[in-house]
Image (cartoon, helix red, strand yellow):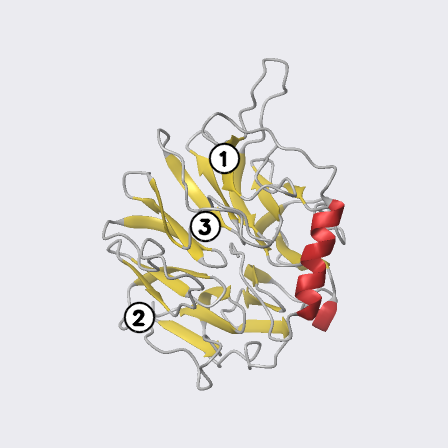
């Protein structure tokens, strides 16, 4: 997700996993500032320097990032090896609901976490440039532009079309990709009540970035426009608008029911669900991006978000019951 994204229709194993996340996280503690934002800079002079990141991905109860040494740091829920990354050098990473995958510098895809539906053990061999992990499935773009998906396929979300892509994004029961011609193509089922595939896709070409959440996705145009489609809002709050602000963006990320972007002015903007109180397993504040910094990257998870400042340090906000919003 650089999303965090992905889900699954039966729901029972998902709810049990969230409960297990909660029970395992009782010993985790976070440190937040007066504004409620957990940053990577620390609060005391005795702390060691914070990790400098070049890329980050937020999942369900955990976060991972690639640092400037091209190795991986993860924090949050310590379950199924999610926060125990392999050694080596990596170029891409994606955290999902109960699994995480990364692309090594040799193009190999490595996955860890819960192996339900084969989302870990069925990772493809070969050389890849981009990977994205959803709820029960994942997809990767090979160096020749083809896409391969694995894991849960009950809605055909793991059956990509025979096209050439530059980027792929996975949601609960659907996947989308950016073609080499700059168009958006999707497969699977975007909405829980929709049976014939995603609708309202961005038209034309010139699309340069893509992100997918639970039941929505967003695309970024080379002119800075962001278009989002699909949505299954569980609230009637008018402030939970799934549409992005009308400003120019350079990067976007989508979580379960919210999305964030970095503007041309290097400001953070988030839109979508912003729970005003803890709601079941979901915590509040996932849309409350910090002000006062220049930002170069952003990641959106289940109920938290993280961003990379211009100095490479990470800041996170929103849910932190597993330590997912407490970067090193």
Q: Element at badge 3?
A: loop
Q: Residue at x 33, y 38 (%)?
A: 266
Q: How many marks?
A: 3
**Residue 229 sits in which quadrant?**
bottom left
Q: Is residue 111 visible?
A: no
Are the residues tagged 3 and 2 within 8 Å (C-beta)?
no
Q: Element at badge 2?
A: loop
Q: Element at badge 1?
A: strand
Residue bearing mark 3? 275
Q: Which mark is residue 315?
A: 1
Which badge, 1 or 2, comes first in the chain's sequence?
A: 2
Relative to 28, is 226 on the left or the right? left
Residue bearing mark 2? 202
Q: Residue at x 52, y 44 (%)?
A: 55
Q: CA distance from mark 3 to mark 2?
A: 28 Å
Which badge, 3 or 1, comes first in the chain's sequence?
A: 3
Q: Report x, y in % for residue 263.
A: 31, 44
Mark 2, other Cα within 10 Å: few <14 / some 14–19 / many ≥20: some
Relative to 255, is 47 on the left or the right? right
Q: CA distance from mark 1 to mark 2?
A: 31 Å
Q: Please identify, in this view, whether the residue under mark 1 or under mark 2 is nearer the observer.
A: 1
Which badge, 3 or 2, comes first in the chain's sequence?
A: 2
Relative to 91, is 78 on the left or the right? right
Q: Is residue 328 above or below residue 55?
A: above
| Foreground residue among 22 and 143 | 22
**Residue 211 sits in which quadrant?**
bottom left
Q: Report x, y in % for residue 74.
A: 65, 42
Are the residues tagged 3 and 1 within 8 Å (C-beta)?
no
Mark 1, other Cα within 10 Å: few <14 / some 14–19 / many ≥20: many
């Amino acid at each position: 997700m650089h999303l965090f994204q992905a889900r699954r229709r039966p729901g029972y194993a998902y709810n049990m996993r969230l409960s297990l996340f909660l029970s395992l996280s009782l010993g985790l503690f976070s440190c937040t500032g007066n504004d409620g934002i957990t940053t990577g800079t620390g609060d005391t002079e005795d702390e060691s320097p914070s990790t400098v990141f070049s890329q980050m991905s937020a999942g369900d109860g955990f976060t991972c990032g690639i640092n400037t040494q091209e190795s991986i740091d993860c924090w949050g829920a310590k379950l199924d090896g999610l926060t125990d990354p392999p050694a080596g050098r990596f170029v891409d990473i994606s955290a999902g609901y109960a699994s995480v995958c990364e692309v090594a510098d040799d193009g190999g895809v490595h996955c860890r976490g819960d192996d339900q539906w084969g989302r870990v053990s069925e990772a493809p061999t070969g050389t890849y440039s981009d990977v994205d992990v959803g709820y029960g499935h994942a997809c990767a773009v090979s160096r020749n532009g083809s896409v391969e998906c694995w894991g849960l396929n009950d809605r055909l979300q793991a059956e990509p079309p025979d096209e050439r892509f530059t980027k792929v994004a996975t949601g609960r029961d659907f996947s989308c990709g950016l073609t080499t011609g700059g168009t958006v193509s999707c497969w699977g089922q975007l909405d829980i009540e929709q049976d014939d595939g995603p609708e309202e896709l961005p038209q034309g070409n010139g699309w340069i970035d893509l992100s997918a959440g639970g039941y929505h996705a967003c695309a970024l145009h080379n002119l800075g426009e962001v278009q989002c489609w699909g949505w299954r809002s569980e609230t009637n709050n008018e402030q939970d608008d799934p549409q992005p602000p009308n400003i120019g963006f350079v990067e976007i990320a989508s979580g379960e029911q919210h999305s964030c972007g970095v503007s041309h002015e290097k400001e953070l903007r988030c839109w979508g669900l912003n729970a005003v109180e803890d709601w079941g397993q979901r915590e509040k504040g996932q849309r409350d991006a910090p002000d006062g910094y220049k930002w170069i990257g952003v990641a959106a998870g289940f109920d938290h978000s993280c961003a990379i400042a211009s100095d490479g340090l990470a800041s996170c906000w929103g849910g932190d019951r597993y330590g997912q919003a407490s970067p090193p």
